[in-house]
């Protein structure tokens, strides 16, 4: 059917902007919105732009174009669950996803932790009753079963703090600060890891652990091994991200799974690993191509988080050697023109939802 059209998602999603910048030279692309936007055609000048009230209407429009192969990139958990539950998927819509049961196990942090803790692959989980009787000296982490980033996550240091929490939440042993997370990014098929790379957080927002605002590629064999075991037991197909922290014995344990495309997806293209390209090829029934990978690559999120970091610590001086600058990609800027990058920043500045998210992160950091 010729060049496939890759469905990137809603035009306001930062990942969509980065994906468009990195993929649009090789593929046809499609972005969409719930309502018409005057800015979107300027942000994505070569993409098809559709206005769809919801995902069902998007699927109907895809079905009306049977001569085109559409490849769905999994950016939002709710849409993934809908695709896994729907019986009316047109034959020209391609995607690679796990079974619905595997997705629900991975997406639910409590189920995920309890599934693998007996094998030592995830941290120990606790109930409120367990902690009331015996609270660990290192403390515990409490977070929502379904959630994103650092919002809703708390570190508890004594049993006196338990009254505000319920057993329905995830309670894990505390392995360390969230800023020490190793991200393991995976492309898999039927429980087999086909391609994988890792990054280590350099800086986060909030500073004690949250969204990555700077990260660098690494490769730990123990993380590779643990990743393979988890993917095999889930019988996973498609893309996902596992977050690992090291325990006091030096073992890396998966603290959660993100069953979708991750926030630092731009590094996938820049580092040369190109898991997203591999995903597209698999969806089309083609073989994965072997790419030349950079020995070292770094990603930075300059606006607003690196800017906030500089303002909050004006004495901090970033010394970028020429080699490091060449090895760094920048969220919202790399592969984009300056005009489109500035337009995207302005779109975020005037978005009330973006400000609400930023405020929640700032409150969390205080």
Image (cartoon, grey):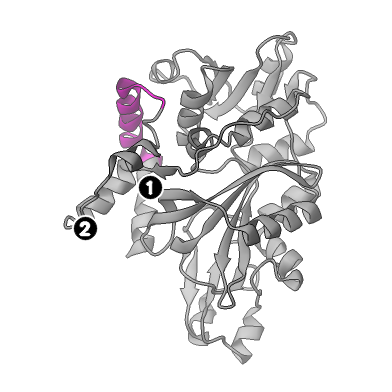
**Residue at mark 2 to residue at mark 1: CA–CA distance:** 23 Å
In the structure shown, which secondary structural element does the residue marked by tag 1 occupy? helix
Above or below residue 242? Residue 343 is above
Q: Position of residue 348 (x, y in %)?
A: 35, 35
Residue neighbourhood size for the residue with mark 1, other residues' Cα within 10 Å, grouped as few (<14), some (14–19), many (≥20): few
Q: Is residue 286 magenta?
A: no
Query: Which residue position is annotated with label 1?
Result: 356
Count of numbered circles on the image:
2
Asked whether disc 2 touches disc 1, contact meaning CB atoms under 8 Å apart, the reply is: no
Looking at the rendered structure, which numbered label has been put on residue 347?
none
In the structure shown, which secondary structural element does the residue marked by tag 2 occupy? loop
**Figure quadrant of residue 118:** bottom right
Report whether 154 appears left or right of 59: left
Span highlighted in magenta in the image: 335-353
> Which residue is at the front of the view, 67 or 336?
336
Q: Residue at the location (58% across, 22% down)?
A: 52
Q: Is residue 350 magenta?
A: yes
Above or below residue 180? Residue 73 is above
Looking at the rendered structure, which numbered label has been put on residue 313?
2
Q: Nearer the viewer, mark 2 or mark 1?
A: 2
> Which residue is at the front of the view, 319 or 73?
319
Q: Residue at the location (45% across, 42% down)?
A: 297
Above or below residue 138? Residue 186 is above
**Figure quadrant of residue 125:** bottom right
């Amino acid at each position: 059917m010729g060049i496939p059209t890759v469905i990137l998602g809603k035009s306001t999603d930062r990942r969509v902007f980065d994906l468009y910048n990195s993929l649009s030279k090789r593929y046809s692309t499609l972005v969409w919105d719930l309502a018409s936007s005057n800015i979107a055609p300027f942000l994505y000048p070569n993409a098809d732009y559709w206005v769809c009230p919801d995902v069902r209407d998007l699927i109907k429009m895809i079905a009306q174009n049977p001569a085109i192969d559409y490849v769905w990139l999994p950016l939002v958990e709710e849409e993934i669950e809908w695709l896994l539950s729907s019986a009316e998927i047109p034959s020209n819509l391609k995607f690679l996803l796990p079974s619905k049961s595997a997705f629900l196990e991975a997406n639910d942090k409590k189920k995920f932790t309890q599934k693998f803790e007996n094998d030592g692959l995830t941290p120990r989980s606790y109930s409120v009753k367990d902690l009331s009787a015996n609270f660990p000296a290192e403390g515990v982490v409490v977070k929502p079963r379904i959630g994103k980033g650092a919002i809703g996550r708390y570190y508890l240091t004594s049993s006196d703090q338990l009254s505000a929490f319920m057993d329905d939440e995830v309670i894990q042993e505390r392995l360390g600060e969230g800023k020490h997370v190793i991200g393991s990014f995976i492309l898999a098929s039927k429980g087999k890891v086909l391609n994988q790379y890792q990054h280590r957080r350099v800086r986060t927002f909030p500073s004690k652990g949250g969204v990555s605002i700077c990260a660098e590629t690494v490769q730990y064999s123990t993380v590779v091994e643990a990743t393979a075991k988890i993917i095999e037991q889930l019988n996973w197909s498609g893309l996902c991200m596992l977050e690992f922290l090291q325990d006091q014995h030096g073992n890396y344990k998966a603290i959660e799974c993100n069953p979708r495309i991750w926030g630092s997806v731009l590094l996938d293209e820049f580092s040369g690993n190109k898991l997203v390209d591999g995903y597209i090829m698999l969806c089309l029934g083609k073989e994965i191509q072997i790419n030349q990978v950079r020995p070292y690559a770094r990603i930075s999120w300059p606006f607003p988080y690196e800017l906030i970091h500089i303002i909050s610590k004006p004495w901090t001086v970033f010394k970028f050697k020429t080699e490091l600058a060449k090895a760094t990609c920048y969220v919202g800027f790399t592969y984009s023109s300056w005009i489109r990058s500035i337009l995207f920043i302005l779109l975020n500045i005037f978005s009330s939802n973006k400000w609400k998210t930023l405020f929640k992160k700032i409150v969390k950091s205080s």
